[in-house]
Amino acid sequence: MFVSKELRKKNIAEYLLYMWQVEDLLRAYNLSIDEVKSALVAPYNLPADSEQELLAWYENLIEMMRIEGVKESGHLQINKNVIINLTDLHMRLLKSPKVPFYSAAYYKALPFIVEFRNKSNGRDKNELENCFDALYMLWLMKVQKREINSETAAATAEIGKFISMLALYYKEEEEGKLNLESEE
């Protein structure tokens, strides 16, 4: 929870990937707060109030996962809302003549996004969710110490650059520093 708060302020892309990781961890611990407590909370010997706050956060996420029917797969609505907000910003950035480098990064990554979508059966997802799926898959491969071929590395590098740029613009917008309106 403490990490998520920091990431949410600092980098929305890292926050979303972190939250997907938390969803998977909660599934791995069978959505059991007792298992979560022993594996994810107790080892850190937090002060009692911090431990209770963290446990309450995990309990709330577990309850949301049950209510929203994402016990085995899928993402919480709070995480889907991040994708929705990023998609809205993405569309506005593409339409704005004030950020040509953003469009260039997107169009450079687009063939890799399409290729990933086709290989992963991600046709029912929007492009940004496909990007995050690709980045999450890369992270999982690294954690599992699986070999990452040069094509995958190159593709996810381009997707990562594009998503990093989107995250920076998101932060600017959150801080009230982003102006996409043209001055005519």
Image (spheres, rainbow, N blue to C red):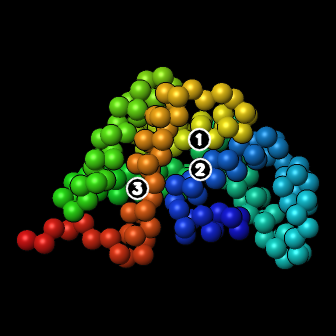
Q: Mark 3 or mark 1, which has the lower sequence index?
A: 1
Q: Which residue is mark 3?
A: 166
Q: Pick whichever, 6 or 83, lies toward us.
A: 6
Q: Mark 2 or mark 1, which has the lower sequence index?
A: 2
The numbered disc on residue 17 is: 2
Q: Is residue 86 above or below residue 140?
A: below
Q: Quadrant of residue 70?
A: top right
Q: Mark 3 or mark 2, which has the lower sequence index?
A: 2
Label 1 near label 3: C-beta < 8 Å?
no
The residue under the point 87% across, 70% down is 46
Q: Is residue 171 above or below residue 74?
A: below
Q: Pick whichever, 154 or 181, lies toward us.
A: 154
Residue at the left extreme, as displayed = 184
In the rendered image, residue 140, in percent from the top left (x then y), is placed at 66, 37
Crowding around mark 2 (Cα neighbors within 10 Å: few <14, some 14 to 19, many 20+) is some
Quadrant of the image for the N terminus?
bottom right
Label 2 near label 3: C-beta < 8 Å?
no
Mark 1 belongs to which amino acid? Tyr
Instruction: Tell me the CA gap for discs 3 and 1.
Output: 17 Å
Instruction: Tell me the CA gap for discs 3 and 2.
Output: 14 Å
Q: Is residue 111 above or below residue 22?
A: above
Quadrant of the image for the C terminus?
bottom left
In the rendered image, residue 106, in percent from the top left (x then y), is placed at 33, 45
The residue under the point 44% across, 67% down is 171
57 displayed left or right of 122? right
SS at badge 3:
helix
Q: Which residue is mark 1?
A: 136
Mark 3 belongs to which amino acid? Leu
The residue under the point 71% across, 43% down is 24
In the rendered image, residue 148, in percent from the top left (x then y), is placed at 61, 29
The numbered disc on residue 177 is: none
Residue 84 in sight in this render: no
